[in-house]
Amino acid sequence: MGFINKKVNKKTVLTILEKKRLNDKITMLTCYDYVTAKLVSSQDIDVMLIGDSLGNVKLGYENTLPVTVEDMIYHTKSVKRGNNGALLITDMPFMSYEISVEDAVKNAARIVKEGGAEAVKVEGGVEIVDKIMAISNAKVPVVGHLGLTPQAVNKIGGFKVQGKTEDKYNRLINDAKAIEGAGVFAVVLESIPEQLAKEVTHCLKIPTIGIGAGRYCDGQVLVIDDMLGMFDNFTPKFVKRYANLGEIIKTAVKNYIDDVREGKFPQEGNVYR
Ligand code: KIV
């Protein structure tokens, strides 16, 4: 039998768990396509998340609800082909795991078998414990997602910071313990007060990965189009912009159009003899 992870630095679920033990921060970015996956994984990122945020930033939907299992498989395949060593986690889209345990396992299996994901992520707490257990028992590693869970946008009344009342604060801690007990190997905490994320991080043996959850999580994740300045429909407070690719692209496109219109492109060096 050959070794499955031939690449020396291939990140796995074990790498992520070990990082918490060593107090070594986990790095995660979303990724949705081959070219970006090549660029991102060339920098030794730990995890690329094929997030259902692709509904917003790639497909132009208002929220993540219309995203399908097929969309997730399509983008996971693309990322997989460009990946160089990162752990690949793919979101299970809205209604692909809520209806029944059987659905949840079937759809998780498709995302792994057809897409090539190495783990899946699901949103929710105690109410989806049976689905998490079933997927994990079917040998698919699962990541949880608590706090602002975008698939619940209609129920929570918008994209708002969560866990601010005492009741919701305690409920989130309870949810975190419940999904850890059900078998998730990590949990994403989105848009919650820093103190709550700190407490959850201390309570759990598994790593927490924050997005808008402050400084004390075991790792951080951002949507790549936000941190590169590609998506400007809405930029949450927690995003740090590391580049302004949107402006760079607009300038390049404008220069190209001007060159073509003025006969400056193509030039001698761009033509065949
Ligand atoms: O869909 C996504 O990109 C996510 C991240 C925001 C964590 O779930």
Image (spheres, helix red, strand yellow):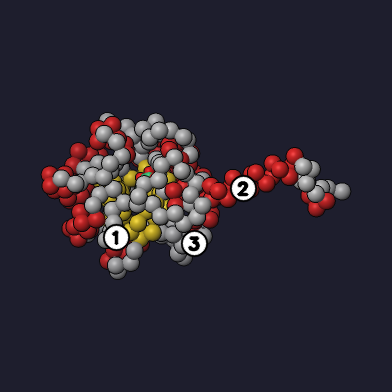
Label 2, residues with CA under 10 Å away: few <14, some 14-19, many ≥20: few
Q: Determine which quarter of the picture holds residue 131.
A: top left
Residue 250 is left or right of residue 135, and the answer is right
- Residue type for callout 2: Thr
In space, the residues marked 1 and 3 are separated at their CA atoms by: 22 Å
Q: Decide: few, some or many residues near mark 3? Use Cα within 10 Å; few <14, some 14-19, many ≥20.
A: few
Amino acid at pointer 1: Arg
What mark, if any, has residue 215 been given in the picture? 1
Label located before the other in sequence (1 or 3) = 3
Say if residue 181 shows up in the picture. Answer: no
Mark 1 or mark 3: which is in front? Answer: 1
Residue lying farthest bottom?
22
Going 40% across and 33% down the picture, which residue do you hit? 62
Helix, strand or loop for disc 2: helix
Determine the residue positioned at 36% across, 32% down.
Answer: 65
Image coords of residue 145 (percent x, y): 28, 46
Disc nearest the viewer among 1 and 2: 2
Q: Name the residue at the right extreme.
A: 273
Which residue is the site of mark 2? 251
Say whether disc 1 or disc 2 marks the residue closer to the N-terminus.
1
Query: Would you say 116 lies left or right of 157 here?
Result: right
The residue that disc 3 covers is 43
Is residue 240 something that shows in the picture?
yes
Residue type for callout 3: Gln
Whole-number angstrom distance, CA of label 1 to CA of label 2: 35 Å
User: Which mark sits nearer the N-terminus, 2 or 3?
Assistant: 3
Q: Quadrant of the N terminus?
A: bottom left
Give the CA separation, mark 2 to mark 3: 26 Å
